[in-house]
Amino acid sequence: MNRKKGILAAGTLTGLVLITILGLGFGNLGALANGSEDTAVPQQIPQEPQITTTDPAAAEAVQAWQDYSAELEQTVKVMQEREAAYQSQLNQANGTIVNLQDQINTSNSAASNGGSASHGDDDRYEHEEHEEHENDD
């Protein structure tokens, strides 16, 4: 759709909305001004309102916007499905990461508990090396 058709469609839809608001809105104000306490009964709006016009260009523009809206709705549905799939994959990957971290932590704690005696031996040898150097001076 080129720019002119888009502008024409937007102007047409804006005009239709403005006429509807002015026609229905001021009609209800006039009823209240005459002393009527009744409120308007809300009517159910169909999913795709049928707009009738005598202008073929406006009818084409309205149809184009309805088609575009349907495409956008379908795109949003596809994106939501993909998001759900990605979220599922992310949750699975996060679970794998947590499991691997638990395994690493378990192996590290086992290594630190089993290797503490050898670490103490290393400290003793380091201390003896320092004493030898002190005696050489």
Image: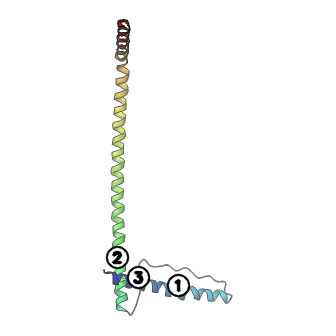
Q: Confirm or deny contact between disc 2 and disc 3 (CB under 8 A).
A: no
Label number found at residue 10: 3
Q: Using the numbered discs, state the Cα–Cα distance from disc 1 to disc 3 in whole angstroms.
A: 16 Å
Left or right: 5 as drawn, with respect to 15: left
Q: Mark 2 points at which residue?
A: 68
In the depicted structure, whether residue 39 falls above or below residue 136: below
Sooner in the amino-acid sequence: mark 2 or mark 1: 1
Left or right: 76 as drawn, with respect to 28: left
Q: Confirm or deny contact between disc 2 and disc 1 (CB under 8 A).
A: no
Furthest-bottom residue in this view: 54
Q: What residue type is labelled 2?
A: Tyr
Residue nearest the viewer, comparing 134 with 77: 134
For residue 103, what is the image quadrant?
top left
Q: What x and y, as percent, mark residue 4?
A: 34, 84
Q: Mark 1 points at which residue?
A: 21
Badge nearest the viewer, 1 or 3: 3
Q: Using the numbered discs, state the Cα–Cα distance from disc 2 to disc 3 in whole angstroms.
A: 13 Å
Q: Is mark 3 on a helix, strand or loop?
A: helix
Q: Is mark 1 on a helix, strand or loop?
A: helix
Count residues near mark 2 (Cα–Cα under 10 Å), then give few for <14, some for 14-19, many for 20+. Answer: few
For residue 48, what is the image quadrant?
bottom left
In the depicted structure, whether residue 137 falls above or below residue 89: above
Q: What residue is rendered at 37% in x and 18% in y? A: 116
Q: In which quarter of the image is the C terminus?
A: top left
Q: Using the numbered discs, state the Cα–Cα distance from disc 2 to disc 1 in whole angstroms.
A: 24 Å
Q: What residue type is labelled 3?
A: Ala
In the depicted structure, whether residue 96 falls above or below residue 135: below
Residue nearest the viewer, comparing 68 with 37: 68
Q: What x and y, as percent, mark residue 30?
A: 62, 89
Q: What residue is rendered at 37% in x and 34% in y? A: 102
